Image (cartoon, rainbow, N blue to C red):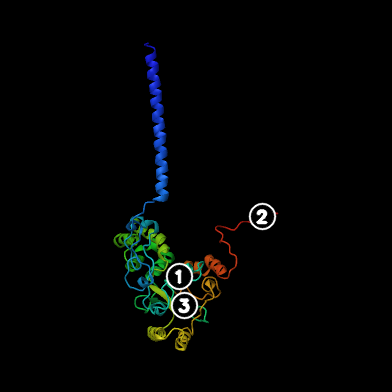
Amino acid sequence: MASRVPAVGKTVLVRLYALLIMLVVVWTGYTAVSYLFRAVFRPVQVPRWFVEWRGHLDAKALREPDVPGVTGPAARAPLGHFHGVDRWFQPAPHSGCTVSGCHMPLPHTKSKALRAFANLHATFVDCMMCHETVTANPAPAMWVNIGTGRRQEPPPMLRLIRILEVDAMKIRREPASVQPDIDGLLEETVALLRGDPLLEYLHLEIHNAQPGSPVWIHAVDQLAEALPSYARGEYGAMIAPQASDIDRERAAAALAEQTKAYRAAAAGSPVRDELYQKIHAVVVPRPKGCLLCHGGRPARLDFESLGYSASRAASLHDAPIAALMQQVEEGRPFYLPGIGPAPGPTRP
């Protein structure tokens, strides 16, 4: 009798263990199926405030002088850092083509393959720089301030990049002689970009450190490495056909009157058609392409005279991406540009 008690106890333990295992399997299966059902048929809606970006990128906002997300950083949701847009577009209130309401601030929309590259130039190149018939090479060009519409010097960012490249040895040997230029141009750049944290920090280091000291040298080296990544159009200025401020103001006033009359005329009327032809009399609808400036000989633009450093001008004159875009525009097959040295000859 005593020997049967341990056997019964062992059997009970085994059955309890089996029951526990079965319950775990059933619970795990139910949980998995329940989760799958909820995920497919009852998905959780992420709150709008959690995923939406708080900036506004519509056409109306692009024409206003101070808009969060356009002229300055916008408050964004916690997930916004995955698509962070710290600076995006500097609207040009003196561009007659866009202020008139006839064209969008980012006007190129037809070609999905090319519009991003074309609209990139719209942030720092006046429309008529590409869409006006010019026979001279290089074409007479100048920098025009976006805010005032008047001629200005090359943007401080470009002048600063040029100093950091051209005077690299002088910065090491005579740091005190270049300190005022670097400090002043960096201060202008920081003010133009409206508070970039990295450039603000580097300006603080360069402004307060002793020229030539390890802290100063490190900050200048970091600036020389980081600054080219900012040269993507946030210049506060545009490259425009060369003209006096008076001539530009007169042309802008005449264009404003013409576009006002055009919009007041009835759609499809002979008057509107005549005004359209008059407004676009000197406009080239489809420019000849990227290689006019980035590969043509002679090039349409003299980049060095516009303030670009010699190395930067050389890279702009012979940009492989421009040749690729030209092939895309013409419908020809293209090949990604090679990276590194060309391979040597191979034997058959």
Nearer the observer, disc 1 or disc 2? 1
The circle on residue 296 is none
The circle on residue 129 is 3
The x and y percentages for residue 221 are 39, 59
Nearer the observer, disc 2 or disc 3? 3
Badge 2 crowding class, 10 Å Cα cut-off, few under 14, some 14 to 19, many 20 or more, is few
Pointer 3 with pointer 1, Cβ within 8 A: no
Q: Amino acid at mark 2?
A: Thr
Q: Amino acid at mark 3?
A: Met
Residue drawn 35% across the image and 61% down it: 53
Badge 1 crowding class, 10 Å Cα cut-off, few under 14, some 14 to 19, many 20 or more, is some
Residue drawn 30% across the image and 61% down it: 204
Q: Disc 2 to disc 3, how far (Cα)?
A: 46 Å
Q: Nearer the viewer, residue 49 or 111?
A: 49
Q: Secondary structure at mark 1?
A: helix
The answer to which of marks 1 and 2 sits earlier in the sequence is 1
Q: Quadrant of residue 347?
A: bottom right
Q: Nearer the viewer, residue 217 or 116?
A: 116
Where is mark 2, residue-wise?
346
Q: Quadrant of residue 219?
A: bottom left
The circle on residue 119 is 1
The x and y percentages for residue 55 are 34, 64
